[in-house]
Amino acid sequence: MVETLTGTDRSAGISYNEILDADSHPVRPILRVDSPLEPGPTVVDASIYYSREQHELEKEKLWKRVWQMVCHEDDIPNVGDAFVYDISSLSYIVVRSAEDELRAFPNACLHRGRSLLHENEKKLHLLRCPFHGWAWSLEGGLKEVPCHWDFPTVSAETHSLESIHVGRWGGFVFINPDPDAGPLEEFLGDFADNFTLLPFERRYKAVHVAKRLPCNWKVAQEAFSEAYHTVATHPTLLGTLGDANSKYDVFGNYSRAISAHNVGSPHITSERYDNPYMEQTPFTKQRHELTGDVYERMEEGLVKVTTTDDRTGYFDDWGRYLDGDQFHADIHLCNWVGGRLAEGMEDEPGNVYTGTFAERREKAGHERRESLRSLLGDDVDQISDAELLDPIYYSVFPNISPWGSFNPIFYRFRPDGDNPEQCIHECMFMMPVPNGEDRPAPAKCHFLDLEDDYIEAPELGALAKVFNQDTLNLPFVQKGLKSLKQVIFANYGETKPRHFHHQLAAQLAK
């Protein structure tokens, strides 16, 4: 690695604002806004990632008291459509009670507690308990009690369902179980200002994949919230992502990170950056940009590594030595090259850009504009390379991460039931609705369990391989935390998890 101590509080590489200065198109001022978090240190107790006490505290003071995204309005388009939202051991229902009216209630019968719904439903007329038949209207009023004469104290006044606050933003439905909650608009502040080029109202859910992971939800969320891990976890990205050049900002209840694409990491030498490996293919042959070693797929689970001094080693897709005179390999690059591939990945051709970073970005920006022209028309000619190319990823407290501009990615992280050491990672692709066309139906959720590979969701494309690298670390993080007292976060490069922990501590202290 080239960059270590710089003597400054930022990367030794070019700054993101300087990258914007070289853009081939005008850049919106909002990308240049600097709003960094005050320097740390931010240190948290390692037990918050696994302790039952922390899990119960979050259940009471976070999930019962904060605005949280439930579903998309397209998931419940018709009157009587209902969505079941589970968070920790809690369960809620959101139902479309009228054409433009949404209601939310605890998912529990007021008689004996049976869940009113155990899965999403369509075109209900009543919310009826399957146990004894008690029923409520879509507005929550008590409608029917079999043998009502036997419950003389039960009436619509005493046993209607408890209404929960509902909010909407960008086509998404939010709830807040706290009866004293302020409005969602106040919670989000100016968040919508970041999405004026392609508002979420103009998008539909084209992909929805959820995967169970063997770690606390905060461990998973933090793994996806900063570019600092790129240097070790994503060696495949070092030649095309300015990881340590990333720009981080915080604004009220949300934070932002922007990483430059087609710039290259400051961690790699200029010699290697200026001389790309022309034999590289996306998923079968890669040069490690730090060491110069070449990783080549022989077959699934078998990787050949050739070093710069011509030693050769063979490894499995977990980087375990099998044969040869090179005895060590990068686990993440072995996983990338030797792991499972979706159909067609093995035959994808290489596409290596050459030239200065500005030339690379201009070329890639032009290609991206042309790919979007049929969807968005000639308006794409007014859009900067930065908006078209760069990962701009937001985090809204407590657990969603919509990506910015024309990137369709939208994450959510939540605990898996009442287990503090498992979670659900969701990835949606929010694609633009083609001009002049009706909204396509939303994608159904494709669920992957603990042992499933992200590759089993081919709709994710190459992102499945990136997710495999990310999540390879997570069970080992969850294990290691129990041998650790504290976790420390970088002042700048881990701004987003720092901001989250500041918000979480404040929420749990209420």
Image: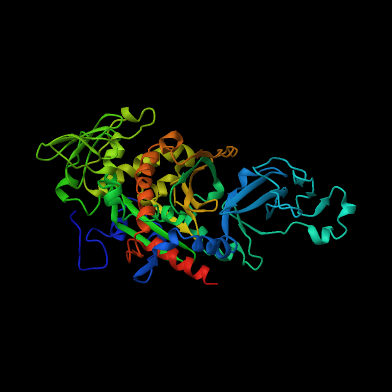
Total marks placed = 0
Residue 221: x, y in percent? 43, 54
The residue that appears at 71% across and 53% down in the rendered structure is 113
The residue that appears at 66% across and 51% down in the rendered structure is 94
Asked if residue 390 lies left or right of residue 313, the reply is: right
Which residue is the extreme one toward the left? 309
Asked if residue 23 lies left or right of residue 411, the reply is: left
The residue that appears at 36% across and 47% down in the rendered structure is 470
Vertical comparison of 21 with 429: above or below: below
Residue 326: x, y in percent? 15, 39
Q: How is the image coloured?
A: rainbow
In depth, the one of 331 and 275 nearer the eye is 331
Would residue 434 be visible to someone looking at this image? no
In depth, the one of 497 and 114 nearer the eye is 114
Name the quadrant of the C terminus: bottom right
In depth, the one of 136 and 236 nearer the eye is 136
Residue 298: x, y in percent? 25, 28
Residue 406: x, y in percent? 44, 47
